[in-house]
Image (cartoon, helix red, strand yellow):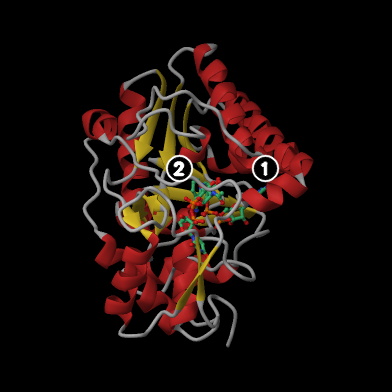
Amino acid sequence: MKVLVTGGAGYIGSHTLLQLLRERHDAMVFDNFSNSSPEALKRVKQLANADFEICEGDIQDACRLNEAFGDFKPEVVIHFAGLKAVGESNEKPIEYYAQNVSGSIELLKAMQRHDCRHIVFSSSATVYGEAEYLPYDEDHPLRPTNPYGRTKYFIEEIIRDWVASWRHASAVLLRYFNPVGADASGRIGEDPNGIPNNLVPYIAQVAVGRLQHLNVFGADYDTRDGTGERDYIHVEDLARAHLAAIQFEPTKSGCEAINIGTGRSTTVLEMVKAFEQASGRAVPYQIEPRRDGDVAHSLAAVGKAERLLGWQAKLDVDDMCRTTWDWQSENPSGYSPD
Ligand code: NAD
Ligand code: UD1
């Protein structure tokens, strides 16, 4: 299939691109490199031993999108591009609405102009907000608690209306839980800017010696060991879910929201232990107060992904830690030269 991948140079995009190329899909990456490096694409090319097109541009730029669609004529779009930091979204909400919501609207307009009827969208479990029950299934009420989460919610609704208005159009809204891990090659992985906000990249930087210790945000939750529980999903499994979604889409019109998680949870301290085992390094930590906005538990109901996409996670927490460690230890400064 001809697949336009917005944000294809980013963390999840680059892993998905690699699988698309390995499965012999034709790809074009559309990215402004605001949070990624062209080096990631170079490495994907080497790993896949296959070529693809790159269009440098911003999804808010209708002209550039027009050029990309006109040149490449994609059959389906996988839409990763956007800003994703919860804290930053509280400080710069308009920037988040502009890039994420307005950018997605420009993208949908370009798709319509060029008769491209299928989209897979990177949504997030953050659209659910405070849990009324767990695991979250796709019918759980949507009450995101920050501007980033609200951009995901609004885009989901906009895509639903877009699909409803157009015959044979379809969309899959993938609600990712907590993506972690790296490609088994150790050549591509997550390369956060500055000090990481998320748990596993932070632990990895402690293990490699870039940061001194982990701050554990809260050990007084009502969980197995008092620390926060999350449903971590390996980025390779997550990438595979996108391939399943593009196979599924043309067979069905309409819009489906689908959780992508494992249905199993891990606490912060369990993750620390698993990482120590995988890396053979100590991960010192300190217990700190709870982080604002955090919840105790998050867990995905995964039945819909199995039913509709025939997809299931295969990799476990040990795989997540091992591949993160391989990536981090071989690339201590990420994609930047050391
Ligand atoms: P990332 O920042 O690594 O990748 C995003 C890519 O999009 C980057 O290459 C960036 O340069 C590009 N980009 C950003 N704004 C753009 C714009 N206006 N025009 C063109 N390109 C632009 O993020 P990621 O972790 O790979 O996440 C990909 C998607 O998945 C995002 O939409 C994110 O919100 C969503 N998501 C991520 C997580 C997570 O934990 N990583 C969880 C749930 C959902
Ligand atoms: C965060 C985002 C969420 C996003 C998800 C992507 C917030 C409030 N939510 O969720 O929108 O979709 O990332 O993966 O930012 N922790 C520590 N020390 C750290 C970092 C984290 O103890 O240095 C703990 C947290 O308190 C939490 C767990 O580790 O219990 C996971 O945190 P994190 O990786 O940031 O993910 P989420 O909070 O689930």
Residue 179: x %, y % from top left: 41, 54
Count neighbours of disc 2 (C-alpha within 10 A) and say few if under 14, some if 14 to 19, many if 20 or more: many
Q: Could you say whether the residue bearing mark 2 is in a helix, strand or loop?
A: strand
Q: Is residue 306 visible?
A: yes
Q: Circle 2 sits on which residue? A: 3
Could you tell whether 76 is left or right of 186 in the image? right
Q: Quadrant of the N terminus?
A: top left
- Asked whether the residues under the numbered discs 1 and 2 touch, taking CB atoms below 8 Å apart as contact, a structural biologist would say no
Residue 136, quarter of picture: top left
Residue 158, quarter of picture: top right
Q: Is residue 61 visible?
A: no
The reply to whether the residue tagged 1 has its Cβ within 8 angstroms of ligand 1 is yes
Question: What's the mark number on residue 253?
Answer: none
Q: Could you say whether the residue bearing mark 1 is in a helix, strand or loop?
A: loop
**318, 330: nearer the viewer:** 318
Closer to the eye: label 1 or 2: 1
Residue at horizontal 58 percent and vertical 88 percent from the top: 338
What is the residue that sits farthest to the front in this orientation? 220
Q: Amino acid at mark 1?
A: Ile
Could you tell whether 276 is left or right of 28 in the image? left
Vertical position of residue 41 compared to residue 294: above or below: below
Vertical position of residue 230 compared to residue 331: above or below: above
Residue 98: x %, y % from top left: 74, 38
Count neighbours of disc 1 (C-alpha within 10 A) and say few if under 14, some if 14 to 19, many if 20 or more: many
Q: Earlier in the sequence, mark 1 or mark 2?
A: 2
Q: Circle 1 sits on which residue? A: 59
Vertical position of residue 190 compared to residue 86: above or below: below
Residue at horizontal 56 percent and vertical 60 percent from the top: 289
Could you tell whether 294 is left or right of 87 in the image? left
Residue at horizontal 62 percent and vertical 33 percent from the top: 150
**56, 287: nearer the viewer:** 287
